[in-house]
Image (cartoon, rainbow, N blue to C red):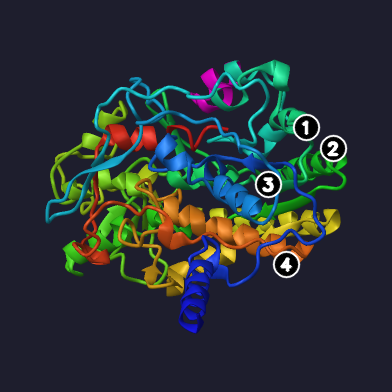
Amino acid sequence: MKKIFGVLTLTAVLLIGCKDDAPTGIEPGLGNVTVNKYVSIGNSLTAGYQSSGLSEEGQQYSYPALIAQQLQIAGASLGKFEQPIWGNPGSPNKALKSARLEILAWPSSGPVIGTTGALAGTATNSALTRPYDNLGIPGAVVADFLDETDFIAKAGTRENPFFPHVLRSASFGKSIYEQAKNVTPKADIITFWLGNNDVLGFATSGGVIISGGVVIPITPTDKTIFATQYTQAFASLRAAFPNAKIVVANIPDVRSIPYFNTVGPAVAANLKGAFAISYQKRGNTGPGDGASYLTEKNPPLLTLASGAYASLISKRTGKWYKDNNIPVPAGIDTTAMFGLDYTNPIPDALILDSVEQKMAGDAIAAFNQTIANIAAEKGAAVVDVNTIFNTIKANGLKIGGETFTADYITGGLFSLDGVHPSSKGAGVVANEFIKAMNAKFGMSVSQVDVSRLPGIPAPLGKYTKASMMPKISAENAREMMRVWNQK
């Protein structure tokens, strides 16, 4: 009997140790908080957007879906957390094929990233007779939260199919705010993460838009306008949900993500300090007025989209102008060596120079100050994603037996577009929201076991950071940015 009792005791210990929430080491619970409904509000980061598209494969691991699972483990009576699922292989590009990027090949010169040409998927639960619990809309800016402009018309104007995909019917509410109010039962927990696209579109496009063959400089949302819009948005949210526990997140530094830290180091490694690149500084469309070896402190940042042209550096080409239907400007000589001769420089659209980096940094600092002020005033918890992402970029992140970094593909935290988290990255983000929620509201929701989430299926040891030169077609690069830079 003693032996049997001992075996049973050991078995019980092992079973307890195998609980899904074991990594946190705490007993899951909600404290004194009643949770019958959780609503998430945000943009592509909230929606579960990965590798330049929405698909069920990624959305099932959106950070709100992961938070909802952990809330239920802690005792919340949420029922099914409803999301606007886009069936695999995912949402469409302009050609109505799947927009999702995949790894197509692994040559020694760098991975080939692109779309497969498969037809896009379709919405799988659009017949839901109420608003979704996940109201993350790819491309949404802060102003969209209260905006009641017809979202079908808005989708057409902004070349963004996600507004009608998520909001679906004005009978549920004409804005994100109205639909959040109409979710039943009334939300007890709300996560709110908007503001990224108010600077991201500016940065990912190199600080310009291309319209009708003309390159036009753009700016992030003005900090005063952002403050007004965010204040109005949050005041409305708090008025509608006076007793809800609200968790907000701030805006990460764009320089902390792989989109800006992948192509430059690979180009520098190829040039070996023998040549400096020639590039156009902000607002310049003529001969290059900037030069860099890309090895100095705070160099200009080549965007991931520039991967479509990085292999052409030193070639005599005008492919970028041709691809974007831009007449070759005065002073540009496309028979000169691209990217090395000042008469055929790397275009402003493919690079974030020091002025543009400062513009982005100043905007993010101002936005985050507004978010901190409003959260403190309205009693919301804050997730400091800015500090978290900067720390990961500087030092990496160890979870269990895995080490994650901010490197493209090999780092494991970001998807193939270099901006949005992978499934494991979404788990990391979910855990930061959970930590903030627990600390602010006296809850003990356990964290997501990141080791159980799928990673990027890739031979991660194949490349070093200096050799990670992704090959992305010009068409895929344009499609990648189409949704991000529309306000």
Label 3 residue SS: strand
Mark 1 Cα shell of 10 Å, populated few (<14), some (14-19), many (≥20): some
Percent across and percent down for residue 84 are: 54, 30
Please name the residue that numbered disc 1 is placed on. 181
Q: Closer to the N terminus: mark 4 or mark 2?
A: 2
282 sits left or right of 16 in the view: left
Quadrant in which the C terminus is drawn = top right
Determine which of the numbered discs, if any, sits on residue 439 in the image. Answer: 4
- What whole-number distance in Å separates the C-alpha atoms at marks 2 and 1? 7 Å
Which residue carries the number 2 mark? Answer: 240
Asked whether the residues under the numbered discs 2 and 1 touch, taking CB atoms below 8 Å apart as contact, a structural biologist would say yes
Q: Nearer the viewer, residue 275 or 148?
A: 148
Hey, what amino acid is under mark 1? Answer: Lys
Q: Residue placed at 81% from the left, 47% from the top?
A: 244
Q: Earlier in the sequence, mark 2 or mark 1?
A: 1
Residue 178 counted in the magenta span: no
SS class, disc 4:
helix
